[in-house]
Image: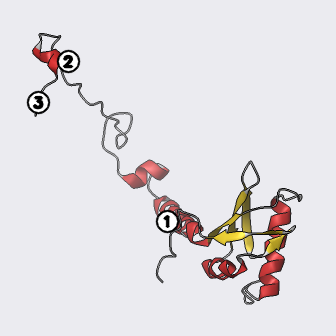
Amino acid sequence: RRERSRSRERGGSPAPPPRKKKQSNWDRDSSGNEVNAGQILSGDGSQAPHILNALVHQAASGSTTKARRIHVGNLPSNGPVDIETLGTFFEQAMQQAGFKNPDQEGSCVKDVWISGEKKFAFIEMRTFEEAERSMGLDGVTLYGNPLRIARPHDYVPPPPK
């Protein structure tokens, strides 16, 4: 095994000296003094717990998004499929199949995203239980096309309670 490249052995230019890493000073104020995380967030640290709690809550709700998302493939090209149509269709299909959670009011479909080519979509359900039940809708027809309903490739199971 060779330790160095051939060009260096033939008398090429010497290797440049290693660069010194620049410090970001993210934890220092303008005068160069160290500051703790609470002071960075709110100036005096008095509101830091509230901000941190909000960030933790936001991260926790975002972590269940992947558990609540389903992939819908084989969307019909001959029908007017848009976000509203697909959301309403899934809402009605979940209701008719008895997959909708009866304890919660409102729509079980939180969000719909359709690809630019309109060949597939991702639907975010209200709860991961409803997302799990929606797998039973695999093969349901929309404008004559049987839809393929499955978990996305980046599926993450819901966190344990």
Disc number lying in front (3 or 1)? 3
Secondary structure under badge 1?
helix
Mark 3 residue element:
loop
Give the quadrant of residue 120.
bottom right
Answer few, some or many: residues within 10 Å of disc 1's Cα (few below 14, many 20 plus, some between 14 and 19): few
Horizontal placement of 4 versus 108: left or right?
Answer: left
Depth check: give the residue in front, 86 or 139: 139
Residue flagged by tag 3: what amino acid is it? Arg
Q: Which part of the image, by quadrant, shows the N terminus?
A: top left
**Mark carried by residue 16:** 2
Q: Is residue 154 above or below residue 130?
A: above
| Label whose residue precedes the other's in the sequence (2 or 1) | 2
Residue corresponding to mark 3: 2
**Where does the image place residue 75, in percent across and percent down from the top left?**
77, 61
Label 2: which secondary element:
loop
Q: 15 or 153, which is in the foreground?
A: 153
**Badge 1 is on which residue?**
56
Is 67 located above or below residue 2 in the figure? below
